[in-house]
Image (cartoon, rainbow, N blue to C red):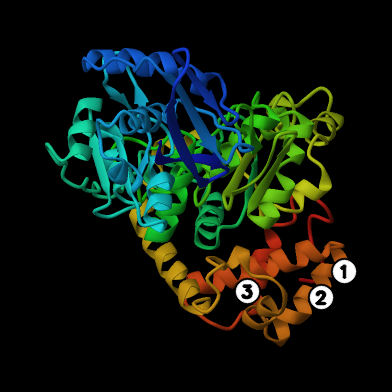
Amino acid sequence: MVATIYTTAFEGVEALPVEIQCALSPGLPGFSIVGLPDKAVSEARERIRAALGALAIALPLERITVNLAPADLPKTGAHYDLPIALALLAAMGIIPKEEAAQVVAIGELSLDGRLVAVPGALPSAMTAAAHDRVLLCPAACASEAAWGGKDLVFAAAHLDAMVRHLSGAAPLVPAVPANAQTDAPRYDLTDVKGQERARRALEIAAAGRHHLLMVGPPGAGKSMLARCLPGIMPPLTPAEALETSVIQSVAGQLPEGGLSRAAPYRAPHHTASKAALTGGGRGAAPGEMSLAHNGVLFLDELPEFQRDVLETLRQPMETGEVSVARANAHLTYPSRFLAVAAANPCRCGHLGDPARACARAPDCGADYLGKLSGPLLDRFDLRIEVPPVAYTELAARPAGEPSARVLARVTQARQAQAARYAACPEIRANADVSGVLLDTVARPDAEGAALLEKAAQRLRLSARGYHRILRVARTIADLEGTEPIRKAHLSEAISYRLLFGGPQTMRGE
C-alpha cells in the first residue's frame, strides 16, 4: 500500500507540485529515495531516522521506497525532510493516509525532531491554495506562508506537533499573516546640501521609474543621493509587495515577519559576478536584478564592474525580466527595477577640476568611461553631472527639502499614472509605456514637437533615446499636474541626455 503526500519544487519563482509516494515492501530493510534527489534530499534519510527516534518511533524492518514524482524534475533542498517523514508515518499507519493526501508540506528536520525554517514558504502556500490543499510548515515560516494561503496554513515547531495535528489528537490553529511592514527610510534628502539638479533628477526617476546615471568627482554626494531614493518612492501596492516577497522567499531572504511594503534597495559591490547579478549558481537562484524587482538597483563605481557583467544589464533594463539559461535550467525572473548608477569622471576622479587637474586629461576620462558601451548608456533616461559642493554651501546653506515633501509629489504623479494606465495592468509607470500608447499619452504640443525634432537631428538620437525623452517629459508633466506635454517639459527632458552622445549645447535655443 502506498501513502501519498505533496510538497513543492522551485522553478524560478514558481513552486511546482511534487507528489511524494512512500511504499513499505517485504525484503531486506533499507531506505531509498528515488526521483532525481540531490545530496541534501538523499541525506534526509538520516535526519528522518534520528527525528523519528526522538519520538520513540523505530523504522519498520521492511524495505522503504520513497518516490518523488515527477521523476524527471530535479529535487533540491532540505525542505523535503518533513513531507518524506510524514509520508513514511502514513505508510506505517501512524497518521491517516487520507489526511496526508490532502497536505502540502515543507520543512527541514533537526535530529531531535525540531522543524527548521526553509526558503520558499510563500510560493509553496500559494501553490497549495491553488490546489485546495493545506500547507504544513515550520513555525518560523508561519507569518510568511499565511499570506499565500489564508486559513490553509498550519505551522509547528516540532515534528511531534505535526503528527498530533494530522492524527486529530491536538489540531493546530491556522497561521495568521503578520502585518505588512513599511520600514522608515534611513536617509532623508535634508542630509543633502546643494545639488538641486541632482535632487530634481532623483524626483523624476522615482516618479516615472526612469534609470539614472550620475557622474561626478569623489565626495560629491552621488552615493548619498542614491541612498535617499527609497525614501521618496511610494510604498509597494499589495500586488507588488507579493511579487517582491515571492522572489525574496525563493532566495531565502524574506525577513521573518512576512511581507514588506517598502521598495527593495540592492547595492551589489563592483566585484559581483554575472551569476550574482543576473541569477544562477546552485538551483539557478535569483540574482541582484530580480531581488531589486519593484525597487532600486544601485551600481556604485559603475566603470569598475567587469564589462561583460555590465552588458547583462541591457536586456533587463529594457524588458523588465531576466532569462537565466543553464545546462539544466531555463528560467525567467521578473526584474522591473529602477537602475541608479554612479561613476567618477576618470580614474583619479578629478577630471575637469582646474585645482586638481588630471595629468592624463582628457584621455583619462575617455579611457575610464569607455568601458560603458553606447547601447548601455542609451538605456539611462537621466544622465547628469554631480559637481562638487563648495565649503561655503556645506557650512551656510539651510537644510534642503525633506523627503516627505518630495514623496507627496511623487505619489501624486504615480497616482495619475495608475489612473491613466488602469486598463493596462502590465504598465505601472511611464517607463513601461511604448508603441501606440506612448504616442497617445506623450504627444507634445506644436512648440514641443518642433524642439524635439531639432534635438533628434542635433543629438542624433536613436529610436530608443527619442522614446525615452517622451517618457521623461510625460513624467515631468505628471509632477507638474498637467496633462498636455509642453515645450518646457521636453526641454528639461532633453537636457538630461546631453552628458553622453552628442553636442553639449543646442545653439539657437
Report crowding for label 1: few under 14, some 14 to 19, many 20 or more residues within 10 A (C-alpha): few
Residue 84 shown left or right of residue 318 in the figure? left
Mark 3 Cα shell of 10 Å, populated few (<14), some (14-19), many (≥20): some
**Under tag 3, what secondary structure?**
helix
Q: Which residue position is annotated with label 3?
A: 488
Height in image: 197 above or below 431? above
**In this rendering, does residue 234 appear at all?**
no
Image quadrant in which the N terminus is located: top left
Q: Residue at x 60, y 37 (%)?
A: 71
List x then y, in percent, for residue 80: 43, 30
Residue 206 horizontal side relative to residue 451, left or right: left
Please identify the quarter of the rendering in which residue 341 is found: top right
Total numbered badges shown on the rendered structure: 3
Classify 10 Å Cα crowding around label 2: few (below 14), some (14-19), many (20 and above). Answer: few
Amino acid type, mark 2: Glu
Asked if the residue under mark 2 is in contact with the one under mark 1, i.e. CB atoms within 8 Å, the reply is: yes
Q: Which residue is mark 2?
A: 453
Measured along the vertical axis of the image, is residue 428 above or below residue 247? below
Regarding mark 2 in the picture, which secondary structure is present there?
Answer: helix
Q: Pinpoint residue 383: horizontal percent, then vertical percent.
A: 67, 51
Between residue 10 and residue 65, name the one nearer to us: 65
Distance from the alpha carbon under mark 1 to that under mark 2: 6 Å
Dot 1 corresponds to which residue?
457
Which residue reaches farthest left? 170
Q: Amino acid at mark 3?
A: Ala
**Which is more N-terminal, label 2 or label 3?**
2
Mark 3–mark 1 Cα distance, whole angstroms, equals 19 Å
